[in-house]
Structure formats: structure tokens, C-alpha cells
Image: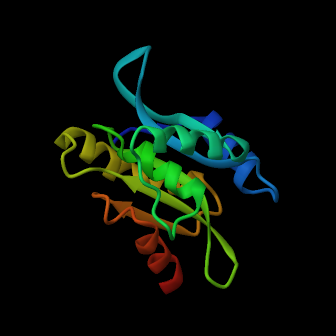
């Protein structure tokens, strides 16, 4: 549990381990959210917000593009869809895990922290104070990338980060 008192659910950890620690994952990415604990009104936990299977990416991205979303030429479809989901409308701060392929064709697991500069201060504090605990629980994460605007979340920026370390 973090200093903020936010725990990561066992289901979130298990889903990550089942899909990102084994070759041939059927998931493109997992998005995590900080949610209220129903039985404890002021308590929070990190749980799965959305899982997207690789087989769903093309259809979901087509729907997003029909709504006006623009996939950038350099980004893979799964990353474009993740970027769309994280930044669509007034989305709250969230985490996501995705596998990124580096220019040398090696793959790395990335934990993204999305926290818009426009997010309420309390939400920004919660996401910031619990990211290290999430990273500890998600064994095998190679990179933690923090993004607060769409430029930070661009695939080019992500590639720079995973190439430099």
C-alpha cells in the first residue's frame, strides 16, 4: 500500500501478469483507474478501468477516427487507440500498460501515467503518490513515462524515452 493508502487490486495485478509476462498476449493494453472502495467511503484503490484486446484495436480505432480522432502516421494502431482513450474529453488521470517496440525490434513494457494539467489537484496528488506502488506490483515494467499533455503522450516522445534508457 502506498503512503497515500491506495492499494492495487489483486485482479489488476493478475490481469497484467497473465497478459504482459507471457509471450503472445491477447491484450493490446490495460488502463487502470483510481476508484473509491465502496465499503470505505474515503478509501481508494487502483483497479482496471479498461482492457483492450488486440483483435478489437482496428474496429475501435475506426470508430474513433469516425468521431474525428486523427491517428499520427508514426504511431502503431494500439498506441493511437490508447492515446485516444486517455485524452478523449475530460478524462481523469489514469495509468496504462502497453508493450512498445523499439527501433531495434526489442519490446519493452511501458507504464504510462496520464495526468492532464487541467485535472483537479486532489486527483493529480493521488495519481502521483500511488504510481510507484503500482510499478512495484506490475513486475517487469521497463519504463515509467509521465504525461501531462498530448505532446508528452506522443509516440515520438515515448520512443525517445525507451531509446534513451
Residue at the spot 63% in from the left edge and 40% down from the top edge: 59
Q: Which residue is at the front of the view, 132 or 118?
A: 118
Horizontal arrangement in the rendering, residue 152 relative to residue 62 (left or right): left
**Number of numbered callouts drawn:** 0
Dividing the picture into quadrants, the one containing residue 44 is top left
Position above or below: 25 against 144: above
Residue 105 point in image, percent of width and height: 70, 79
Picture quadrant where residue 72 is located: bottom left
Q: Is residue 71 above or below residue 57?
A: below
Give the residue at the far right of this rendering. Answer: 23
121 on left or right of 135? left
Q: Position of residue 58 (x, y in %)?
A: 64, 46
Q: Quadrant of residue 160?
A: bottom left
Q: Which color scheme is applied?
A: rainbow
Q: Position of residue 88 (x, y in %)?
A: 36, 41
Q: Residue at x 39, y 43 (%)?
A: 68
Q: Nearer the viewer, residue 145 or 127?
A: 145
Q: Is residue 134 visible?
A: no
**Which residue is at 70% across, 54% downward?**
20
The answer, for residue 69, to whether it is visible in the render is: yes
Q: In terms of depth relative to the viewer, which is nearer, 66 or 52?
A: 66
Amino acid at each position: 500500500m502506498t503512503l497515500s493508502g491506495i492499494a492495487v487490486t489483486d485482479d489488476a495485478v493478475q490481469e497484467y501478469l497473465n497478459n504482459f509476462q507471457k509471450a503472445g498476449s491477447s491484450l493490446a493494453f490495460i488502463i487502470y483507474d483510481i476508484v473509491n472502495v465502496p465499503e470505505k467511503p474515503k478509501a481508494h484503490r487502483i483497479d482496471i478501468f479498461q482492457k483492450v484486446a488486440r483483435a478489437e484495436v482496428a474496429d475501435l480505432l475506426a470508430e474513433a477516427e469516425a468521431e474525428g480522432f486523427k491517428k499520427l502516421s508514426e504511431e502503431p494502431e494500439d498506441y493511437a487507440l490508447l492515446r485516444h482513450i486517455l485524452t478523449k474529453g475530460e478524462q481523469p488521470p489514469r495509468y496504462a500498460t502497453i508493450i512498445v517496440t523499439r527501433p531495434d525490434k526489442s519490446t519493452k513494457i511501458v507504464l504510462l501515467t496520464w495526468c492532464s494539467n487541467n485535472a483537479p489537484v486532489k486527483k493529480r496528488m493521488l495519481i502521483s503518490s500511488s504510481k510507484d506502488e503500482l510499478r512495484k506490483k506490475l513486475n517487469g515494467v521497463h519504463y515509467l513515462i509521465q504525461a501531462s499533455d498530448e505532446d508528452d503522450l506522443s509516440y515520438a516522445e515515448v520512443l525517445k524515452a525507451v531509446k534513451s534508457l
